[in-house]
DNA sequence: AGAATAGTGTCTATGAGACAGTATGGC
DNA sequence: GCCATACTGTCTCATAGACACTATTCT
């Protein structure tokens, strides 16, 4: 293999959650050059004997403290333009993670500060490397996938109300949805959600049925993003 | 960079076209070990100063002889499981290309034989490396994208009839579509196609209007794959 | 004329969106 | 009682699918 050009390979994570009606992303503040002091996506180098997905799962667990099987993790895209990392030729494989609202914005093991930031307040070019481009791709992917997959449930705890699921859609899409039509649509789409048999307690108003994620991987028919010029 | 594990990085291409009512893929027969004599996706190593997309475009041109701006080229996914290449730790970035029916199945510069093969006749585990998995991902991506993007036009020459576009859909989806409803749907979707102002000559039957690809990047409403259990 | 293909019109069933109205809890 | 939220029912409009019909060429 010495005859082939040597690359470094990293994974970077776009970790999204919905907190208090805001779409938030997990960022770490870099403690070393390059981009010292700047916000960046969590990530790190892939071990020479480590699978890419394993490396992404490892970084996710290290940064959040959450055991793996919660939420959703998928490959997003690969970024390898020469010069994107001043340390050398680094190709990064970006992953997208969708998580329920987690208790702690735990400081990572890397001693760098980690925190949830509302994506609406991240300014252009505020992030290290080309991470603003990766973030934009992650947001676009998440918004699109809510339409035709049940991934909105990845933003929710194991049991959730239809209203909670609706706030996920409203937050990610930044659009208001009619609660009555939404309810009919979700419960009428086969395999999207299934009743947990329990109801909420202690809230205002009539208690709501709790649901779990159903068995479908694709929604038929899809949830349609309202209003014009989607895209 | 010597402190980080060294990887080799390659690009591999899933190049699809529609020939004679069959969905075909461009494959090369390997002339050297490993997998000597087996069919494989065209591809090769990325130069240490070369962008990933540039490497993919270069390989595409080398194998097909086509200048770049024809058809469509997009990143598909990255495959890097340890052991997927017996030569060492190789991470490959797969790209998906959609091309119109090209004249020559040109033999590549690598002296390896290249040819268009119908995807329906590729047996399981017939391909080298993990290329069967990559091919499956490319097919799935192409089928899905025909629904909500105008990419079916990438399978057509610059000017084409609605009937030609329909055969693309029918071939990729392996489903029959109603010519009348299809015509109404395509011409009624804003930005999908625009009239070229010319008509076909010499064929049987009434001459057909020629169209070019329109300006839209997404279709609203989408073309829906008929029949049940899509996905 | 007849065959073949292009393109239009009409009907019907389904689903989205708007929104009235009912149910069930906390205070 | 009042308020808040959950949930159901009804109406209307748009669109997909089925398919009859007209248009324009070649042989």
Image: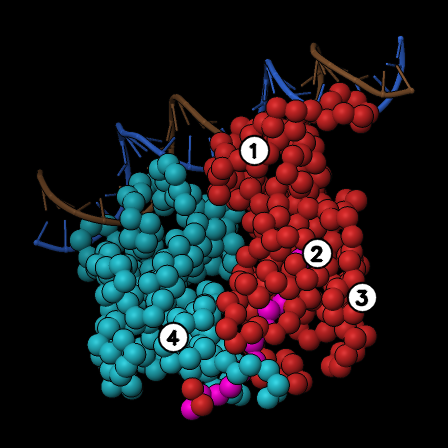
Chain colours: A red, B cyan, C brown, D blue
Residue reaching furthest to the bottom: A3
| Labelled disc at residue A113 | 3
Q: Chain for mark 2? A: A
- Callout in the foreground (3, 2): 2
The Cα atoms of the two marked residues, 1 and 2, are separated by 27 Å
Quadrant location, the N terminus of chain B: bottom right
Q: Is residue B91 above or below residue A103?
A: below
* First along the sequence among labels 3 and 1: 3
First in sequence: mark 3 or mark 2?
A: 2
Disc 4: which residue: B85
Q: Residue B206: horizontal and vertical position, in percent?
A: 23, 50
Query: Which-is-in-front pick, marks 1 and 4?
Result: 4
Residue beneath disc 1: A193
Mark 4 vs mark 2, CA separation in Å: 33 Å
Q: Could you tell me which secondary element the residue under label 3 belongs to?
A: loop
Q: Is residue B101 above or below residue B168?
A: below
- Say the numbered circle drawn on residue A65: 2
Q: Is residue A179 left or right of residue C2?
A: right
> Which quarter of the rendering shows the C terminus of chain B?
top left
Q: Chain of mark 3?
A: A
**Region rendered in magenta:** A3-16
How far apart are labels 4 and 3 at the CA level? 38 Å
In this view, the mark in front (4 or 2): 2
In the rendered image, which quarter is residue A89 located in? bottom right
Q: CA distance from mark 3 to mark 1?
A: 37 Å
Place of residue A62 in the rendered image (x, y in percent of width and height, measured from the top left): 68, 62
Dominant SS in magenta: strand
């Amino acid at each position: 293999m010495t005859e082939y050009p040597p690359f470094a390979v990293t994974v970077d994570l776009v970790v999204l959650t919905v907190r208090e009606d805001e779409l938030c992303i997990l960022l770490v503040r870099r403690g070393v050059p390059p981009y010292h002091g700047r916000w960046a996506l969590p990530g790190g180098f892939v071990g020479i004997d480590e699978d890419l997905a394993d490396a992404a799962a490892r970084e996710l667990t290290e940064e959040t403290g959450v055991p793996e099987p919660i939420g959703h993790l998928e490959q997003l895209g690969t970024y390898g333009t020469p010069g994107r990392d001043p340390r050398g030729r680094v190709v990064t494989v970006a992953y997208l993670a969708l998580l329920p609202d987690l208790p702690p914005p735990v400081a990572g093991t890397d001693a760098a500060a980690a925190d949830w930031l509302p994506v609406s307040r991240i300014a252009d070019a505020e992030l290290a490397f080309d991470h603003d481009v990766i973030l934009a791709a992650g947001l676009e992917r998440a918004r699109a996938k809510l339409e035709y997959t049940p991934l909105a449930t990845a933003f929710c705890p194991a049991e959730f109300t239809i209203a909670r699921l609706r706030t996920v859609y409203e937050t990610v899409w930044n659009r208001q949805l009619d609660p009555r039509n939404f309810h009919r649509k979700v419960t009428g789409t086969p395999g999207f959600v299934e009743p947990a048999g329990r109801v909420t307690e202690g809230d205002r108003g009539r208690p709501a049925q709790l649901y779990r994620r159903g068995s479908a991987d694709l929604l038929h028919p899809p949830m349609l993003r309202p209003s014009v010029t989607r895209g």
